[in-house]
Image (cartoon, coloured by chain):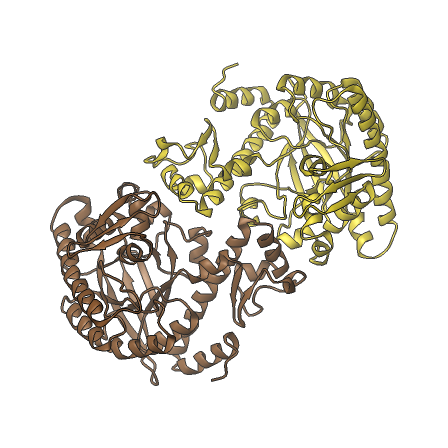
Chain colours: A brown, B yellow
Amino acid sequence: MLDTLQFEIIKKDSKTKARRGILTLPNGTVQTPVFMPVGTQATVKAMKPEDVEKTGAEIILGNTYHLYLRPGEDIVRDAGGLHNFMNWKKPILTDSGGFQVFSLGDFRKITEEGVRFKSFIDGSFHDMTPESSIQIQNALGADIIMAFDECAPYPADRKYIDDSFRRTTRWLERCKSELDRIRNGSGRNAEIAEKQNLFGIMQGGMYLDMRIESAKQITEFDLPGYAIGGLSVGEPKDLMIEVLEGCVDYLPYDKPRYLMGVGTPDYIFEAVERGVDMFDCVLPTRLARHGVAMTSKGDISIKNAEHIRSFEPLDENCDCYVCRNYSRAYIRHLFKAGEIMSSMLLTEHNIHFLINMVAGIRKAIEEDRFKEYKKSFYSKYYDQYD
Amino acid sequence: MLDTLQFEIIKKDSKTKARRGILTLPNGTVQTPVFMPVGTQATVKAMKPEDVEKTGAEIILGNTYHLYLRPGEDIVRDAGGLHNFMNWKKPILTDSGGFQVFSLGDFRKITEEGVRFKSFIDGSFHDMTPESSIQIQNALGADIIMAFDECAPYPADRKYIDDSFRRTTRWLERCKSELDRIRNGSGRNAEIAEKQNLFGIMQGGMYLDMRIESAKQITEFDLPGYAIGGLSVGEPKDLMIEVLEGCVDYLPYDKPRYLMGVGTPDYIFEAVERGVDMFDCVLPTRLARHGVAMTSKGDISIKNAEHIRSFEPLDENCDCYVCRNYSRAYIRHLFKAGEIMSSMLLTEHNIHFLINMVAGIRKAIEEDRFKEYKKSFYSKYYDQYD
């Protein structure tokens, strides 16, 4: 069976490991490096899909855990899949549910079979296994689906991580078998599965030897892409970069590499520099709902009194819809008045900001000046000159 | 000084008093009868102004009471007026603050001078007078501004209403004088005031003789338009229609007539039939946030379990953005999940529904079949065949 994912690296930065690629998926083409906005519950919060597309977004995320619990994957399937349900016609990636099972469940029990967890909605108990995760993701119908893994906590001792990443590999094998089983079946599920691309997830905590072993194990499955999970889970930035630096190259050079859950500008730059292609994070949308705008000169809190009479746009260097049409004073007013429009405008601006930042990264790689772009961005955003 | 409002009646229904007009204002042309969506706090809740415009809306409302308290009219003026502040370039009408002073204040004291009230935001005390209302509305810069009036409660005895409507007339005189004073001044305020059109408001409770006396008094000021206030404040529908029927003709035939705060389909039809041209109401936006969609077959609550697997649009007879792209099942999911997108989609649909209903009224008047259209609409919306 041919995978429906194609990945081509069209340019490499000469001074770093940054690469510029084109990822072709059943529902469209994605320029990499890429930032993927998160649409947890079948909506990028507070944005119409057309407006998400206008920011330049080419692929978004959906969350298996949330959609399984509500509205239920069968409803999404019957609606013609997640693309149709939420009116987003470009590529979608769904996570496996693993991360949320561990981070949102106030009760969970891990066995070799899978995970038992408590619903965040009504407290009911549910089991999720590698097989059921793939079945759910098949019903959702995303272009890229993720293996069911354990995103181990930080800190965790060697014994815990050792058991965990090895089990994640065994679960990957079951995920792949389940996808193959569905593909070899008949009907609509098989048709959908044929077009879905399974990514394996490297784990191993902060232990580089286990990261490398995990990478070796999962790459044996010859999957269309690989992710790095379990980083940016609370560890210091230096440690995160050290681990990332030491493990990225153990993932195949010619396949897309996805660093899960990472979306702060500095983490994106550091990871691109080390050869990562894909990112996702709720940061821009969540900050927006808390009244924070990401700007080329750093984040600003629109609540602050200094914006009461500021008729400037959120970011003078931004050409997004929000910055072209609204002032800080107006958005502050909306936020203070509890108006939905505040979340709508700040979300659109923040998504545009990150998408545009990553577009700048792509252009810089094309022109072999990634480091210069990074330095220039940092000097303004972090007010940091080295 | 010439008023900048022009009103032309281009067609009259032969069997009723319904009329089809064109209202020309400084910021654009408005086809009447017209429904005006409400943007209380400088935003039509949960909608971008471009999307409001796409529904066919040609004029919206702003609320003087709210904008005076937050962000303050000086900020709106410094932002270049309400049009610029909120990015709505078509006509705007601001109310006088009178209605909210009476309906939202948990403390209020009426004197000949004006009203002392308590802020709904922080409980602070404020005074509003005919003069200050006009000054605030001048700062906001709407195309149509309303006289400061008392919207008397229902029920109220003859003595109360008699005192109240006569005071409202005296306040109107002061409003007109204040507008003239600003116009005869200099600078930006005078420039703005020159383009603003003051509407007087008829009061008189449910007492027809006082309604008629009120109409006679306010029309002596020869204003560019007149409103009917104090109806649809809790009285039975029959009584409302009876009063309306008996008083509309006392407003000049050749000037626009505005029935304030009315937005249910039946009240709009009944009022158009009696010669009213303009309407506003928070109904479509408020219903939306409570999960109710207005459809050609009546209102539906999207919360209801019957919509769980309904892949039909909200209204099969609707061609709005929402009905073209989303199912009831999706919108129900968004509502149950507490997603902002639920309010966004339901609001856009509901505004489109009412705007489109009134467009249908205009077309029906042009084709001299208002009664037939009303009957046809009622038969589906109210399941009522006569």
Image coordinates of residue A131 in percent, x first then y, are 17, 52
Q: Quadrant of residue B97?
A: top right
Q: In this view of the protein, which residue sits in the foreground, A123 or B367?
A: A123
Total number of numbered discs in the rendering: 0
Q: Residue furthest top?
A: B386
Q: Residue A62 versus residue B52: which sits nearer the camera?
A: A62
- Residue B78 position within the rendered picture, expressed as x and y whole percent measured from the top left: 72, 58
- Position of the N terminus of chain B, as image quadrant, is top right
Q: Along the horizontal axis of the image, is B250 left or right of A181?
A: right
Whether residue A139 appears in this view of the structure is yes
Q: Is residue B1 visible?
A: no
Residue B310, compared with residue A210, is above or below; it is above
Name the residue located 26 percent from the left edge and 53 percent from the top edge.
A108
Query: Residue A38: x and y, percent?
Result: 38, 57
The quarter of the picture where residue A326 lies is bottom right
Viewer-nearest residue: A206 or B251: A206
A315 left or right of A248 in image: right
Is A385 drawn above or below residue A251 in the view shown? below
Name the residue located 56 percent from the left edge and 27 percent from the top edge.
B265
Q: Is residue B214 above or below residue A338?
A: above
Q: Residue at x 72, y 34 (%)?
A: B8
Say if B328 sits above or below A146 in the image.
above
Q: Nearer the viewer, residue A346 or B372?
A: A346
Is A274 on the left-hand or right-hand side of B181?
A: left
Percent across and percent down for residue B269 are: 60, 24
For the point 69% across and 42% down, the residue is: B93
Left or right of A338, for residue B242: right
